[in-house]
Amino acid sequence: MNQLLIVLAVCAVVAIAREYPLDFISGAPKDVVSSIEYYAHFGSFRKNGEAAVNKWIAKQPRKIKDAYAKLKADREAHTAHVTSWFHDEMLKITNDLIADAAKDKKLTTKQKNEKIKKLINSLPKEVRGKAKNPLQG
């Protein structure tokens, strides 16, 4: 289970990493350029990176502010899409593992329930409630 989740996580990171036009940051301080590039690729900022970017953006003309706002909107939409896909894939895999555990004739009902509970609890809380436990009807 953990190995499958690691593979999915790597796929999600690769899917999240995406190229965005960043020509609007030419001439920005190195820390701002680095922070925006990091954000564009990974969808988050390093420590204090967002504060430095926001401070710099606040002093820029409308064209740069608009380009940065578009980058953030695109980035957030893409991250939400990839996260949704990742959660769906995790849920499919977990539901298959749960079904296998429920059918395992070597396990007692108590052991099956424990295994299923452990699988469900391994999911992110956003997905947990969607997992199907066939033993609970």
Image (tube, rainbow, N blue to C red):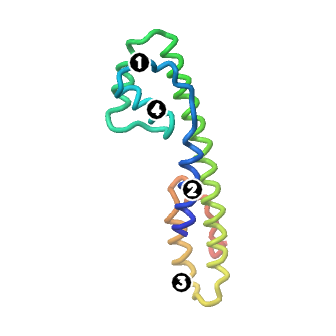
**Residue where numbered disc 4 is placed:** 37
Residue at 37 percent across and 38 percent down: it is 46
Q: Percent x, y for residue 56?
A: 37, 19
Q: Identify the secondary structure beneath mark 1.
A: helix
Q: Percent x, y for residue 67?
A: 53, 19
For residue 127, the mark is 2
Q: Is residue 87 above or below residue 113?
A: above
- 61 or 122, which lies in front? 61
**Residue where numbered disc 3 is placed:** 111
- 118 or 129, which lies in front? 118
Q: Is residue 55 above or below residue 61?
A: below
Q: Which circle's residue, 2 or 1, is located before the other in the chain? A: 1
Cα–Cα gap, marks 3 and 1: 56 Å
Q: Identify the secondary structure beneath mark 3.
A: helix
Left or right: residue 28 versus residue 105 is left
Q: Quadrant of the C terminus?
A: bottom right
Dot 1 amino acid type: Ile
